[in-house]
Image (cartoon, grey):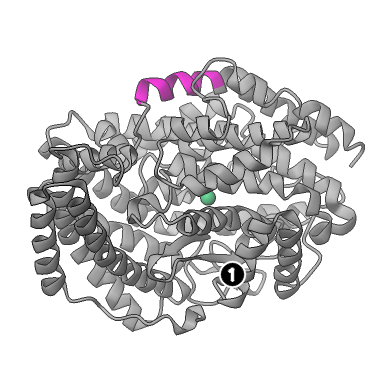
Amino acid sequence: MKFKDFKYERPDFDSNKSNLVELIKKLAEAKNIDEFRENFEKINVIRRHIQTMSTLAGVRNTIDTRDEFYDKEKEYWDGIEPHYASIDNEMFKILVNAKFDISSVVPESLIKMADYAIKSFDEKIIPLLQEENALCSKHGKLYASAKIEFDGEEYNLSSITKVLQSDDMDTRKRALKAKMAWFKANQAEIDDIYDKMVKVRDKMAKELGFENYIELGYIRMNRLDYDADMVANYRKQVLDEIVPLAQKYYKKQMNRLGLDELKNYNESIEFTTGNPKPKHSPEEMIKRAHKMYTEMSPETGEFFDTMVEQELFDLIAKPGKAGGGYCTGLFDYNVPIIFSNFNGTSGDVDVLTHEAGHAFQAYSTMKNGITIPECSFPTMESAEIHSMGMEFFAHPWMKLFFEEDTNKYYYLHMIHSIKFIPYGVLVDHFQHEVYAHPEMTPAERNEVWMKLEKTYLPHRDYDGIDVLSEGGFWYQQKHIFEMPFYYIDYTLAQICALQFWDRSYTEDPNVWNDYVNICKVGGTKTFLEILKEGNLKSPFEDGTIRKAVSHIEEFIDDLGEL
Ligand code: ZN
């Protein structure tokens, strides 16, 4: 069955509720593990179906935000999800307080998540959750509606990226000004949405008995085995090890481009001869990705066959389509789906490696018989190891996409991986400040951003462009609005993916097996347990970061003049 034939039907809340309540009661009364398993599985069949319908509505809504039917359905789900969450919570209470050992049915990671779900929810915050959902939808819609006129053409926030990477400096500068003019025109509304988001989250935290949103944010992000102190220590290591390395490559970039200063609109350009671009049409790239995954391993080959046969992609930018890219799972069908906005840059290939890495993990987990919705994907920081790891495992096939520009791609990919980490840590540090001081005004928040930016990205030079030079770069970072505290995850995962790269580079024979193994366990383990499973070192441990980046300069030097 192809994706377009997957049938959407809004599930009936009342009948689902009564069925679930009944089964949860039986779960609580189970006298032995067999009775417990039987009822737990029945509950998950229903929950999988509910999630499948909610996801299907969400995916179709992002494919065409103008489609009124799915727009209405998305609104429906925004409103009903907290009520389903409240039923889930009843089940979670039973998992947490089980009278006998349930570990053969329920992974320890889910019991921890259940405990967190209980701590982060109460009937009385439902109106606040609904308000938060509505603000996220409003933000998403505002950004998706962005129209940027530039040189007689109309762009959205995704498609303008191509012009921002133009070979011509003046074009890049004008395009960045045009993009930021949209943010300037909408700044009051963006500030208002974010201000309301911060306040509603802070209120939620306080109603649940937390001091502020930080602790609740960690719980909602399912940080199962690390805390804000460990993250603060990690940020310090990034400051010591990665910031100087990144600064070195910013300097090299400036010299290579023959510039005296590296203005922000030049940062996307690494080479005077232009950045590497994929050489083929989207259709041809999918064919080549198919060849790559077939050659990579039997597991990845089978996975990509399914993706192609069932048309589980929506890759090309179209009017009305929401921005960005993602991968999600449709549990009833046991398949993942990949969404993106191809724009002709090397980012398109990243979708075929990064999002496909997520999809491969989800596929491997479902194939492994893991049917608990919460365990189909691991927690966020772990999930990004699979995707960012795949970007590196795909290196040997990059010639299929970049032809004569392949070495340039390697350079760009590696340099971006390094340069990304200080930025990601900055986004995290900013959010800690925001939620520690929810009373800050929008202008004060932008001042905080500016100050932190000087620490992590000391080279930044916005050439006086509006919004950016006033501490508003973060407006472009959707996660800050819609997924608080989700961002450090990418940097933690990057340190792990770099370990996979380093082990491939130094020809460790077990590296691929370790990768496949962590794909199979999905979310049945916590972050630190997954690292053990994959023979990876914890990024919180001193020395891990230094070791992970120890061969990078050698690798880059070997690429020669570019
Ligand atoms: Zn990802």
In this picture, is 74 found above or below 216?
A: below
Query: What residue appears at the point 83 percent right and 40 percent down from the top-left corner?
Result: 257
Report which quarter residue 111 is drawn in.
top left
In this picture, is 508 found above or below 472?
A: above
The local crowd at label 1, few if under 14, some if 14 to 19, many if 20 or more residues have their Cα within 10 Å, is: many
Residue placed most toward the observer, 414 or 187: 414
Quadrant (top left, top right, bottom left, bottom right) of the C terminus: top right
Query: What residue appears at the point 32 percent right and 57 percent down from the top-left corner?
Result: 136
Q: Report the predominant secondary structure element of the magenta stretch.
A: helix
Question: Which residues are drawn in magenta?
Answer: 227-237
| Residue 88 left/right relative to 62 | left
Q: Callout 1, which amino acid?
A: Met
Residue placed most toward the observer, 154 or 523: 523
* Residue 28 visible here: yes
In this picture, is 36 found above or below 71?
A: above
What residue is disc 1 on?
Answer: 307
| Residue 491 left/right relative to 510 | left
Residue placed most toward the observer, 385 or 316: 385
From the top left corner, tell me how far across and down residue 554 is, in percent.
82, 27
In this picture, is 93 found above or below 447?
A: below
Query: What residue appears at the point 15 percent right and 40 percent down from the top-left corner?
Result: 98
* Residue 462 visible here: no
From the top left corner, tell me how far across and down residue 165 is, in percent.
71, 55
From the top left corner, tell me how far across and down residue 236 is, in percent.
50, 18
| Residue 124 left/right relative to 510 | left
Query: What residue appears at the point 22 percent right and 55 percent down from the top-left corner?
Result: 40
**What secondary structure is marked by label 1?**
helix
Residue placed most toward the observer, 451 or 1: 1
From the top left corner, tell me how far across and down residue 359 is, in percent.
54, 58
The answer to if 31 sits in the magenta stretch is no
